[in-house]
Amino acid sequence: MADTSPTSPSPEPYRVPDADLDDLASTLAKTMAEVRQHGVILDRLGSEPDPGAIQPPDGAPEAEAADGKKPDGPASVFILALGGKEYAVELAALSDWVNYLFLPVYGREISTSRPWCAHWHEHPEAVARLHALWLAWQQFTDTEAGLSGPSTWHRDHLDQTLAHLRAPDGPFAACTTSATRPNHRVLATPAPEQAGVAA
């Protein structure tokens, strides 16, 4: 038996004007970075035990159990509190955000008065500041932050971080700025003096 039902014409494919392709590519890159970050957050949430399932060890005070603190895990999501594999996973996620969202949007021209280091991940201060900036970005770009969240992030977090990172005497001050001399160098800081113990 032949099909006699009327067929609807297939919809025309959506065409993007050439002038909008750059915006589309930028939006896609941002979306991909957000998806990666959401994956990291989901991995982090998936690896955390259920707080209701944590049983205090025998003899542990009830206050510790009520706090939900786990003695063997990190006390913070801040990257400097992490170690080993957790640090490496967090640094990889931070690198994705820095390379695919932060630098394409906020990376300005490099000069001696506004230095930047391609090896930023070798600078503990830069890692700490960028990670704090990323954590704030996740919080203030969430829908729960409200419509003014991104503005608050720019004003209270981004501007301050850029001012410190890219200052002439900031963590990248000892780094070269020439693409023909990509060597990275960090000047050693003096060791703190040991105070003598009075007898």
Image (cartoon, rainbow, N blue to C red):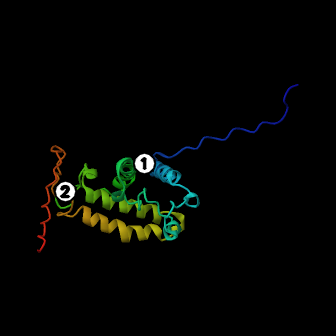
Amino acid at the residue labelled 2: Ser
Residue to which mark 2 is pinned: 111
Given residues 20 and 138, the one toward you in this image is 138
Q: Is residue 116 visible?
A: yes
Q: In the picture provided, is 86 more to the left or to the right than 146?
A: left
**Which secondary structure, mark 2?**
loop
Instruction: Tell me which numbered mark, 2 or 1, is placed earlier along the sequence.
Output: 1
Q: Is residue 9 left or right of residue 126?
A: right
- Toward the viewer: 109 or 20? 109
Q: Measured along the vertical axis of the image, is residue 40 above or below residue 13?
A: below
Q: Quadrant of the C terminus?
A: bottom left
- Dots 2, 1 in contact, CB < 8 A: no
Q: Residues within 10 Å of mark 2 (few under 14, many from 20)?
A: few
Q: Is residue 146 visible?
A: no
- Horizontal side of residue 164 vs 175, given as left or right: right
Which residue sits at x=46%, y=60%? 70
Residue type at mark 1: give it.
Answer: Asp
Residue 74: quarter of image: bottom left
Query: Vertically, is 67 above or below 22?
Result: below
Location of residue 10 with respect to 107 vertically, above or below: above
Where, quadrant-wise, is the N terminus in this rendering? top right
Residue found 13% across the figure and 66% down from its top: 194
**Residue 85's x, y, as percent?**
38, 47
Residue at 60% across / 41% down in the picture?
13
Residue 22 numbered tag: 1
Residue 21 locus on image (x, y percent)? 46, 46
